[in-house]
Every structure is written in structure tokens, then in C-alpha cells.
Amino acid sequence: MEKGGVGVRVLALCFLSLLHLAAAGRVYDVLRYGAKGNGRTDDSRAFLNAWRDVCADRDNPTLLIPYRARFLVKGLTFQGKCSSSVTVKIDGDIVAPEWFWTNEYVSLMAFHNVNRLTVVGGGEIDGKGKIWWDCFNRKEGKCVNRPNIMSFAFCNDLTLRGIALRDSPSKHLTFFASARISMSRLRISAPGDSPNTDGMLIALCKHVVVSSSTIGVGDDCVAIGSNTTNVTVSNVKCGPGHGFSIGSLGGDSSPATVKRVHFLNSTLTNTTVGVRIKTWMSGGTGQVRNVMFKHINFTSVRKPIQIDQYYCPARNCQNRTSSLTIENVEFAHLHGSSSDELATELLCSKYHPCRGIVMRDVHFTWNGVAPAKSACFNVLSSRSYGRVLPSLNCVAG
Ligand SMILES: *[C@@H]1O[C@H](CO)[C@@H](O)[C@H](O)[C@H]1NC(C)=O
Ligand SMILES: *[C@@H]1O[C@H](CO)[C@@H](O)[C@H](O)[C@H]1NC(C)=O
Ligand SMILES: *[C@@H]1O[C@H](CO)[C@@H](O)[C@H](O)[C@H]1NC(C)=O
Ligand SMILES: *[C@@H]1O[C@H](CO)[C@@H](O)[C@H](O)[C@H]1NC(C)=O
Ligand SMILES: *[C@@H]1O[C@H](CO)[C@@H](O)[C@H](O)[C@H]1NC(C)=O
Ligand SMILES: *[C@@H]1O[C@H](CO)[C@@H](O)[C@H](O)[C@H]1NC(C)=O
């Protein structure tokens, strides 16, 4: 009996390690493909050559960017479909050139049509954004289309874990038309005043989980774009930046839908906005519904809560009658300090008032000491529960 038990266990162990080996597959090291890893030579070609072999391998291969090296690359497209699941292991660092290497809307590293992709490692990807921000701030034409660091399009079953991204010329991560994305333990950083450096933009995606990450940037920590469903963001530390944002939506004529988005158990520190839903004033159709912001702590957030259906940064919007509808949005257990007196703003559309807003135990103080204020209009069928401060005159207690 005893012996049999041990035997079974040994067998099970062998079987497990076989499984493990099978899952690990062959490792393709970019150094073997001629990458220099000295931070100066352009290693783009070596990366792409290695990718060609990785993508053709049928047995769960790994593209390795090894530790103790720094690889200069630019404008890489990792094209699928691949023959198997693929791991990209970023143990070393990757760095963008410190010159204007594109005038198109591209990424330092783009993944297209790669399914079952895992990007892991403790390495850092540095977008060397400073020259681009300075150029943008000087309003020079050549840096209107600034590159992002990493983008994913048509990538289903995608996992990102552990990597660090810093100083993107534009957004750090973008996701389009992808399903089942899981992100954890990411570190994303750029100065609070760097222009449009969102932590991540997620659009046309479904089933997304973001957890246990730190994001401090010059724009939204997490932005949710149109036609996105089932997103859960939890245990994220955001700041500086513009907070957690749904939108802006309705900027073009096609209908936009955002459903089932939850931001939970997070902290916002020194951000301009806390949590917001933003739609263009001049029109757009579609809906935002079933959104929850829950268990979030705010420290020195200029405006902790905002629904803004009058978004029009250039102030040249046509005054149209259409607009998206916003329905069933719950703000629950949100506490902390605002740095503006006006802490909560629900500015809904005159034509399609917001409905089903729930405020549950939501309280802010202005600078941690004084009472804060709210603004609220075009809100119907909405309720507040528990302590809600500042109170909202268009939400029944
Ligand atoms: C808040 O963010 C701004 C912009 O990044 C920065 O200059 C300032 O030092 C930050 N303040 C605190 C208290 O972290
Ligand atoms: C939402 O996404 C999660 C994570 O991918 C998934 O487990 C869950 O089944 C999805 N929920 C629905 C209703 O599709
Ligand atoms: C979003 O979905 C709607 C309805 O399916 C579609 O008409 C619209 O073009 C989509 N938007 C984008 C940006 O793809
Ligand atoms: C928010 O603050 C409360 C009280 O200080 C604390 O119990 C809770 O764990 C904090 N939540 C998060 C997500 O940090
Ligand atoms: C969020 O925190 C609550 C307790 O405050 C916990 O019950 C829940 O499981 C947490 N959810 C996530 C996704 O972290
Ligand atoms: C829309 O137009 C009317 C009349 O032209 C103007 O009075 C009103 O202020 C405009 N609304 C907004 C939100 O700009």
C-alpha cells in the first residue's frame, strides 16, 4: 500500500515534469540570432528573425530576450498566426532609439493576430519618450503621431505578467479586437506631465482582467474605449495620471458600447480625475452600462468622480441632439480627499439623462479637512445609500 502510494507519486511527478517540459518547448534566444544587446546597435532584425522561427514552431516555443543585456529595437511587428502557443520572455531590457524613428502611428513592439501569447519577465521596456514629449509640447508636426510602446491587435488568450514599461512617447499598452486578456504585476511609469502617455487603452475587446499593478503616467492609468465588454481592474495603484476612465466615447459616427466594467480594490493618488465616464458632446450613439467602481481610496485627487457628457476639448463641437446613454453605474465604498472643492460631478446629457446611478458609502473631503461640493444634472431613477458626501441633489437619498 505504502509502496504503491510512493510509486504512484513518482509516476505522477514524472508525468508532471513531462507536461512541464512539453509546455516549456524550445527556447529561441535573440543573441543566437545576432542581437548585440549593447543598447546601441539596432537589434530589430535579429528579433524578427528569431520570431519567424518561434512562430513556425509547433511545440510551445519561447522567444527569449535574455537577462543582463539591453536591446535597442524599433517598430517591430510580430505577425501571427503562429503554429502553437508562444511565450515571449523579457528578462533583459529593451530600449527605443533616442531619435525620431517614425512619423507614423506605430508601436515599438506590435503583436498582430498572435493567439495564446504570454509575455512575461522582469525586464523593462523604455520608450525614451522625452524627446517626443518636448517636440509635441513645442507643437512640431513631426511628432503628432508618436509611437506607443506595445500594442496587441487580434490576439486572443493573451497574458502579460511582470514586465515594466516606462516613458512611452505616447500610450504604453494598447489592446484592440482581442479576447481573454489577463494582466498582472505590471509596472508602468512616466512623468505626470508627459502628454497623452496612457498606461493602457483597451478597445474592441472582451473578457479582460487587470490586477496587482502599479501605473503612474501623464494621462489615463486605464482607459476603456468603444465596444468593450467584461473588464475587471483590481488592486491597481494609480498615480500620477488622469485616473480610471471609460471614454472618451462617441467621437465618431459609429455606435459605441461599453458594458460590464468593474474597477475594484484600488488606490488613486495625486491624479487629476479619479474615476470617470466621458462622452463627446457633439453626438455619437450607443450606451455605457453595468459599470462599477468599488472599494477605491483616493488621496489628493483633483476630481474624484466625474461623468462628463459634454466633452469637447477644442470647444468647437456642434450642438447635436444625439448622445450615448449611461445606465446602471454604481459607485460604492469610495473614500478620500479631493484637491478641488468640487469633488463629484455628474453632468449627463439633456437628451438622454443618466439612469440607475447608485452611490453607496461615498465620501470625500476637500484637502482632507473641508467639506467638498458636487454638481449634478440630468440624472433620473438614481439612489444613494449610506453616507454620501458631498451629497448630490439629483440622486435621491
Ligand atoms: C503630483 O503629481 C505632480 C505631477 O506629476 C508632481 O509634480 C507632484 O510632485 C506630485 N505630488 C505628490 C504629492 O506626489
Ligand atoms: C468575464 O471575463 C472573465 C475573465 O476572462 C471570465 O472568466 C468570465 O467568464 C467572463 N464573464 C462573462 C459573463 O462572459
Ligand atoms: C462597435 O459596434 C457597433 C455595433 O456592432 C458597430 O456598428 C461599430 O462600428 C463598432 N465600432 C467600432 C469602432 O468598431
Ligand atoms: C482603503 O482604506 C481603508 C481604510 O484606511 C483600508 O481599510 C482599505 O484596505 C483601503 N483599500 C485599498 C484598496 O487600499
Ligand atoms: C476586493 O476586496 C474585497 C474585500 O474588500 C474582497 O472580498 C474581494 O475578493 C476583492 N476582489 C478582488 C478582485 O480583488
Ligand atoms: C447649444 O446651442 C444652444 C443654442 O445655439 C445654446 O444656447 C446652448 O448653450 C448650446 N449648448 C451647449 C451645451 O453648448
Image (cartoon, helix red, strand yellow):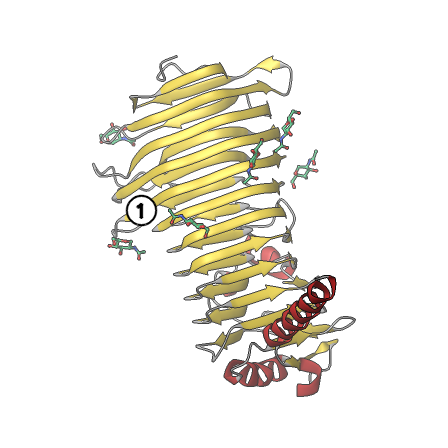
Q: Where is residue 301 in the image (x, y as percent from the top left)?
A: 58, 30
Label 1 residue near ligand 3, CB within 8 Å: yes
Spot the residue most to the right: 68
Question: Can the viewer see residue 146?
Answer: no
Q: Nearer the viewer, residue 27 or 202?
A: 27
Give the percent coordinates (x, y) of residue 142: 51, 65
The image quadrant of residue 62 is bottom right
Residue type at mark 1: give it.
Answer: Thr
Q: How many numbered tags mark residues here?
A: 1
Foreground pick, 94 / 212: 212
Provide the residue designation for mark 1.
257
The answer to whether 289 appears left or right of 31 in the picture is left
Q: In this view, does 18 lie to the left or right of 353?
A: right
Which residue corresponds to the image point at 25% horizontal and 51% vertical from the top-left? 253
Q: Residue at x 51, y 73 (%)?
A: 85
Q: In this view, does 299 lie to the left or right of 309?
A: right
Residue found at x 36% / y 37%: 290
**Quadrant of the rendered image holding ligand 3:** bottom left
Question: Split into 4 quadrants, where in the image is the N terminus?
Answer: bottom right
Q: Where is residue 227 in the image (x, y as percent from the top left)?
A: 34, 51
Q: Quadrant of residue 383?
A: top left
